[in-house]
Image: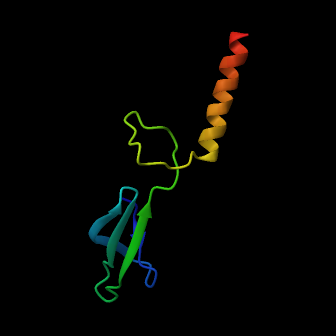
Amino acid sequence: MAAFFCPHCKGRAKTRTSRGLSPTLRELIYQCEDPECSYSFVVQAEAVRTLSPSGKPDPSINLPQSPIALARAQSTSADTTSAAA
């Protein structure tokens, strides 16, 4: 999981608990490791786009293709088409 830092003291924060809210959304509770601060906060981590397709796709998951990945796939397809000609 990505490192998070306290928005107040800028110290490192540690994950205390987490729970899935959906197949693509997770809620995490972080707590600042600085004992003088001890700020707690909630982070939501969400899958938002596809970079490469799954080899075992779940039909209920439909995330949009990343524009960069889509351009790369079109470029590869165009290269394959021109090489075959």
- Residue drawn 41% across and 68% down? 44
Percent x, y for residue 14? 31, 71
The N terminus sits in image quarter: bottom left
Name the residue furthest left.
Answer: 17
Percent x, y for residue 23? 36, 56
Tell me: 60 left or right of 69: left
Name the residue furthest front.
Answer: 60
Tell me: 62 left or right of 30: right
Q: How is the image coloured?
A: rainbow
- Residue drawn 39% across and 77% down? 11
Image vertical order of residue 17 relative to residue 2, above or below: below
The C terminus sits in image quarter: top right
- Residue drawn 37% across and 80% down? 41
Percent x, y for residue 78? 70, 24
Tell me: 47 left or right of 77: left
- Residue drawn 65% across and 19% down? 80
Quarter location, residue 58 = top left
Q: Nearer the viewer, residue 84 or 34?
A: 84
Q: Nearer the viewer, residue 9 or 52?
A: 52
Image vertical order of residue 51 relative to residue 6, above or below: above
Name the residue furthest bottom.
Answer: 36
Percent x, y for residue 69? 59, 40
